Amino acid sequence: MTALAPAKLNLGLEVIGRRPDGYHELATIMQTVTLADRLTLEATEPAELGGTAPVVFTVDDPALGEENLAHRALLVLRARAGRANGAVAHLEKRIPLAAGLGGASADAAAALLAGCRLWDLHLPSGKLRGLAAELGSDVPFFLRGGTALVTGRGEAIAPIRPLRDLWFVVVTPRPAAPIPRKTAALYAALLPEDRSSGARVRAHAERLDRGVPLDPDALANAFSRAVYGLRPELRRGAEALLGAGAPWAALSGSGPSHYTAVPHRSVADEIAARAASLAEPSDAIAVCAPHLGPPPVRPGGPDSDPV
Ligand code: C5P
């Protein structure tokens, strides 16, 4: 089985307030993109004497260990389904880590969908969504992908009209030192002045759903002040894009990835090439397009192309 795990961009993000359960209420528009990790899976038989076979998981990026959310997703899925079959899984990382692009959550959603196919599980979709939400706040969105207004803790997903004819340039500056438990740290660093009602994102979602083009003025991100406050050097993502001629630059998720969007691939490629000369060599730069729908899953090994 081969699955692709498309990354996401946040097209505007508002944090509304802290909930009694410690999570935050948010309003954001999420968009999956063609920048994707690739997960390959092979099923193995239950161990002799009815024992549970191992799920062996390897990753091509040493920065991400065997202990990752996709591995956990497979283990939890199998336990809930009460199966003893195992798997040999390999993850090829293309989405930068801890970048605001949802890579870990995307991998987990792809693992859930591919695991269901691999082990021939027929979980009701509500159960799968519940499992996804247990794994992480962003995981339920990745099960369906596309363009959606995402509210609540991240589990309330309202699909909107797909964005079309748009190319994104994504610049991910590598921080001088990683921010430990980045997402939690950035939520914790928010001040009352970073909060807003969610009305801007909701209004933008409503316009996009009517076919009005993406509005750069609606892409503000509640984490901007906190990200730049913790790591001022991360501004260079936006600076590289703007210096390269991007019409605007927006922050995705809790950063540090910044992106811009233009209507033509050739223009996106030119901006990416110029941004590469302005950014640090360790920074990641990608050109991608909107990805429609859930993570593609196909039978076959790593050579089969799931898109
Ligand atoms: O759900 P996930 O494990 O991805 O969240 C990581 C951390 O980010 C949580 O432990 C919490 O501190 C914070 N978070 C939050 N509100 C959300 C999502 C995440 O406060 N809606």
Image (spheres, grey):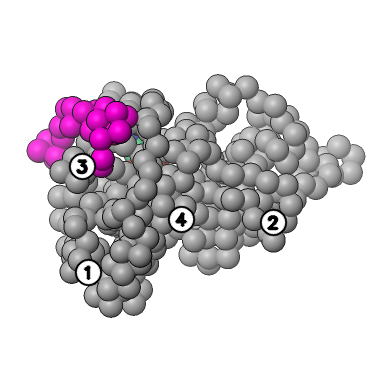
Q: Indicate yes or no whether the magenta region holds residue 206.
A: yes
Tag of residue 215:
3
Tag of residue 304:
2
| Residue at x-position 41% and y-position 56% | 288
**Which amino acid does the dot numbered 4 rest on?**
Leu
| Residue at x-position 61% and y-position 38% | 113
Task: Look at the numbered disc 4 and say if its residue's Cβ is closer than 8 Å to ligand 1.
Answer: no
Q: CA distance from mark 2 to mark 1?
A: 36 Å
Q: CA distance from mark 3 to mark 4?
A: 22 Å
Dot 4 or dot 2: first in sequence order is 4
Dot 3 or dot 4: first in sequence order is 4
Q: Is 88 located above or below residue 73 in the figure?
A: below
Q: Which residue is mark 4?
A: 35
Q: Which residue is mark 1?
A: 244
Q: Are marks 4 and 2 in contact (CB under 8 Å)?
A: no
Q: Indicate yes or no whether the magenta region holds residue 198.
A: yes
| Residue 71 appears in view | no
- Say which of 115 and 226 sits in front: 115
Q: Are marks 3 and 2 in contact (CB under 8 Å)?
A: no
Dot 2 or dot 1: first in sequence order is 1
Coordinates of residue 260 in the picture (x, y in percent): 27, 55
Q: Residue furthest right?
A: 49
**Which amino acid does the dot numbered 2 rest on?**
Ser
Q: Is 94 located above or below residue 252 in the figure?
A: below
Which residues make up the magenta segment? 191-215
**Which amino acid does the dot numbered 3 rest on?**
Asp
* Circle 1: element type: loop
Q: Are marks 4 and 1 in contact (CB under 8 Å)?
A: no
